[in-house]
């Protein structure tokens, strides 16, 4: 089993919170698609005979591409790798791009999962975050996608932003739950360096949300999604039965993946690689026949830490047998010792030899993780 991520590094405008690598506008778009297809060819053999079970178009803004470009990329992937017949093929889309023709065209070329960035159903919040679409655009986009035949739709929401009180957040959750969606990703705002929000924060133009308010919003999210039949399978991800994202799960389950395009990451099982964060450098290097990446071998401590961090955020938790078998007795004993105080305080629980966060523990997950890691 393996996964593929394809990065589309263009956005119409930059949202004030976002640090994902993208350039405003379409500069070099066709040269970029050529280089991307070249990189895909150059990586032939990376997975040996392993089948590719998930493909994910992320960004940036994949929905800024023409359908012909998307089809060309997908065809190149399928020609180069052994893609399973039932592969999950996800496409990140911005609501303002999803016109009538585009949605069925995506279905026709084999995309079977949409991830739509909504963030909020309040136009004032959308403006505050510098989103290009309105709340109505977002609702229309989901409804069109469902009526065109998409039956695996995810939406993204953001909470913990200035001005979003608990009442507004509840309305956002209710609106999300009233739509024909099978999956919700809801992220607490992170103020990333190099973003407009980070600059605003330094100048005192915006404030960070009080921890108490963040926790109240997170609790409400967990409660309301659960009532509506969604399962929280990861801290920020909620799915109806049968709609857990196979692609995201592969990141948490140490399944190898290849990321194409500038800033994309790859993982082979023993090495991590990340491509250069520049479209220009990327195109130039790929055209000369070299993939511009930096790599590092994963040491046993790094592998242990990554496993602990990613697994703890999921409903499957940390498999203690897996720890013992793959990371040895010393790390296993370290984990048993470090986790005991959190088990006593009921922030962690042991279920079937798996260490999982309790509801109480979810609120301090970062603190727990840092104690369970080997520094
Ligand atoms: C790659 S991004 C966006 C994809 C797509 N271009 C869009 O805007 O919908 C995926 C998601 O990450 C979330 N995100 C990005 N930066 C974030 C931040 N600083 N804090 C919280 N959520 C963030 C947003 O919900 C966003 O939809
Ligand atoms: S959230 Fe999406 S549209 Fe906004 S800047 Fe990030 S990638 Fe671009």
Image (cartoon, rainbow, N blue to C red):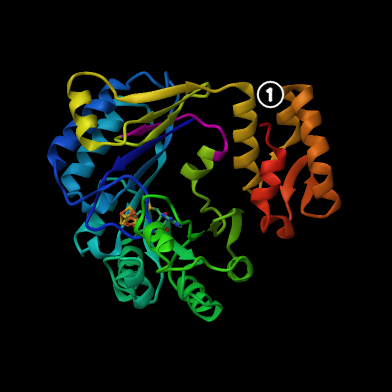
What residue sits right under mark 1 in the picture?
326
In the figure, is residue 290 to the left or right of 346? left
Q: Is residue 130 above or below residue 75?
A: below
Residue appearing at x 31%, y 76% in the figure = 136
Which residue ends up furthest to the right in the rendered image? 344
In the figure, is residue 159 to the left or right of 121? right
Name the quadrant of the C terminus.
top right
User: x%, y% of residue 84?
Assistant: 41, 34
What are the residue bounds of the magenta stretch?
Answer: 252-260
User: x%, y% of residue 251?
Assistant: 51, 38
Q: Is residue 317 something that shows in the picture?
A: no
Q: Is residue 251 something that shows in the picture?
A: yes
* Observer-nearest of 168 and 130: 130
In the figure, is residue 291 to the left or right of 164? left
Residue appearing at x 26%, y 24% in the figure = 41
Residue appearing at x 30%, y 73% in the figure = 134
Quadrant assignment, res 27: top left
The number of discs equals 1
Query: SS at mark 1?
Result: helix
Q: Assess whether residue 21 is covered by the magenta stretch.
A: no
User: x%, y% of residue 290?
Assistant: 26, 19
Q: Is residue 129 above or below residue 45?
A: below
Quadrant of ligand 1 in image: bottom left
* Observer-nearest of 310 and 182: 310
């Amino acid at each position: 089993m393996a996964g593929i991520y394809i990065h589309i590094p263009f956005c119409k405008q930059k949202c004030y919170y976002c640090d994902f690598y993208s350039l405003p506008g379409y500069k070099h778009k066709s040269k970029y698609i050529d280089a991307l297809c070249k990189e895909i060819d150059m990586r032939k053999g990376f997975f040996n005979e392993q089948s590719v079970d998930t493909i994910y178009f992320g960004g940036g803004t994949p929905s800024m591409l023409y359908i012909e470009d998307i089809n060309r990329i997908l065809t190149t992937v399928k020609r180069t790798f052994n893609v399973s017949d039932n592969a999950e093929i996800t496409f990140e889309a911005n609501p303002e791009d999803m016109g009538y023709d585009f949605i069925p065209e995506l279905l026709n070329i084999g995309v079977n999962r949409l991830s739509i960035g909504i963030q909020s159903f309040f136009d004032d919040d959308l403006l505050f975050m510098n989103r290009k679409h309105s709340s109505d655009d977002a609702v229309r986009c989901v409804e069109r996608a469902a009526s065109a035949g998409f039956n695996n739709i995810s939406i993204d929401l953001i909470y913990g932003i200035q001005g979003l009180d608990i009442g507004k957040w509840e309305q956002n959750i209710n609106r999300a739950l009233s739509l024909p969606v099978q999956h919700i990703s809801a992220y607490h705002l992170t103020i990333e360096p190099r973003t407009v929000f980070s600059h605003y924060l330094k100048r005192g133009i915006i404030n960070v949300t009080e921890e108490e308010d963040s926790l109240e919003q997170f609790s409400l999210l967990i409660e309301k999604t659960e009532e509506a039949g969604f399962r929280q399978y990861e801290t920020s991800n909620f799915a109806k039965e049968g709609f857990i994202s196979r692609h995201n799960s592969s990141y948490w389950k140490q399944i190898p993946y290849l990321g194409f395009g500038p800033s994309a990451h790859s993982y082979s099982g023993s090495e991590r690689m990340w491509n250069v964060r520049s479209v220009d450098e990327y195109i130039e290097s790929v055209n000369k026949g070299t993939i511009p990446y930096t790599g590092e071998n994963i040491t046993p401590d790094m592998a242990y830490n990554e496993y602990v961090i990613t697994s703890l955020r999921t409903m499957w938790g940390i498999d203690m047998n897996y720890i013992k078998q793959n990371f040895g007795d010393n790390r296993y004993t370290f984990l048993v010792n470090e986790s005991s105080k959190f088990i006593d305080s009921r922030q962690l629980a042991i279920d079937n030899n798996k260490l999982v966060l309790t509801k109480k523990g979810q609120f301090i997950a970062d603190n727990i993780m840092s104690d369970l890691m080997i520094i």
